[in-house]
Image (cartoon, grey):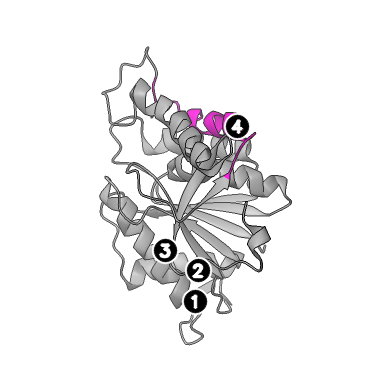
Amino acid sequence: MKLDIVAFGAHPDDVELGCAGTILKEISLGKQVGIVDLTRGELGTRGSAEIRHQEATAAADILGVAVRENLDMRDGFFLNDEQHQLEVIKMIRKYKPEIVLCNAIDDRHIDHAKGSKLVSDACFLSGLVRIETEIDGVKQEAWRPKLVYHYIQWKNIEPDFVVDITGFTDTKIKSILAYGSQFYDPNSKEPESPISSKNFLESLNYRSRDLGRLAGVDHAEGFTVERYLAVNSLADLM
């Protein structure tokens, strides 16, 4: 199955928090989008790997993505090495995306920066024909995505561009709230975490509103790039 876009996240819920609005918009425009989670988030303060798997499946249904996979890397301890790069390369060659979305290049959680660099490096290596991979005994062809973009997470990193997600924020929040074990619930008996507060949940709305305000739209999501952006015409810019 060829996809237009594959969004990678170090943990289940990273993609929803960082770029769910963009995914929803691209799907509405006819794009085929998939999600690949690197870990099961088993070291999370709240919930469990099993619960988060169920939540990730529910969130994927809300977003309407074509596929969601989990590479089952070790939460907190995966590395940007050959073994892990090859696992990501297999996903890139399997789905042949034109665009890859991945974690923030710098963030509070160490897995986010690690995941960001791991996926970025794998996107380059995936285009090298002398790196051989296979799935189910079938040799894969080399494939390099045209574009790699990094979504913004905990830190307020200055975006290189923003995507207008006006009209998609309600469904984005719904996909995030599918992770009931992770986010604000006044009745929860689970330990508190940095993302379980009411303030964090509300911040998702005011961040998208603020990025939208700066771009002249109602809501937006921000991304950083690895190379210069180019447009065919000044008229392509909003």
Q: Secondary structure at mark 4?
A: helix
Q: Amino acid at mark 2?
A: Lys
Q: Are marks 4 and 3 in contact (CB under 8 Å)?
A: no
Residue assigned mark 4? 171
Picture residue at 58% right of the left edge, 67% below the top: 94
Q: Amino acid at mark 3?
A: Val
| Mark 1 → mark 2, Cα distance in angstroms | 7 Å
Q: Position of residue 137 (x, y in %)?
A: 56, 74
User: Residue 90 shows which numbered tag?
Assistant: 2
Picture residue at 60% right of the left edge, 32% below the top: 171
Q: Are marks 1 and 4 in contact (CB under 8 Å)?
A: no
Using the image as rendered, state which of residue 47 and residue 147 is in the foreground.
147
Q: Residues within 10 Å of mark 3 (few under 14, many from 20)?
A: many
> Left or right of 17: which side holds 230?
right
Labels 3, 1: front one: 3
| Mark 3 → mark 1, Cα distance in angstroms | 16 Å
User: Residue 133 shows which numbered tag?
Assistant: 1
Residue assigned mark 3? 119
Q: Are marks 3 and 2 in contact (CB under 8 Å)?
A: no
Labels 4, 3: front one: 4
Q: Which residues lie in the magenta part?
A: 164-184
Using the image as rendered, state which of residue 22 and residue 126 is in the foreground.
22
First in residue order: circle 3 vs circle 2: 2
First in residue order: circle 1 vs circle 2: 2
Using the image as rendered, state which of residue 233 and residue 120 is in the foreground.
233
| Mark 3 → mark 2, Cα distance in angstroms | 11 Å
Q: Are marks 1 and 2 in contact (CB under 8 Å)?
A: yes
Q: Secondary structure at mark 2?
A: helix
Q: Amino acid at mark 1?
A: Thr
* Residue extending farthest right: 30
Q: Amino acid at mark 4?
A: Thr
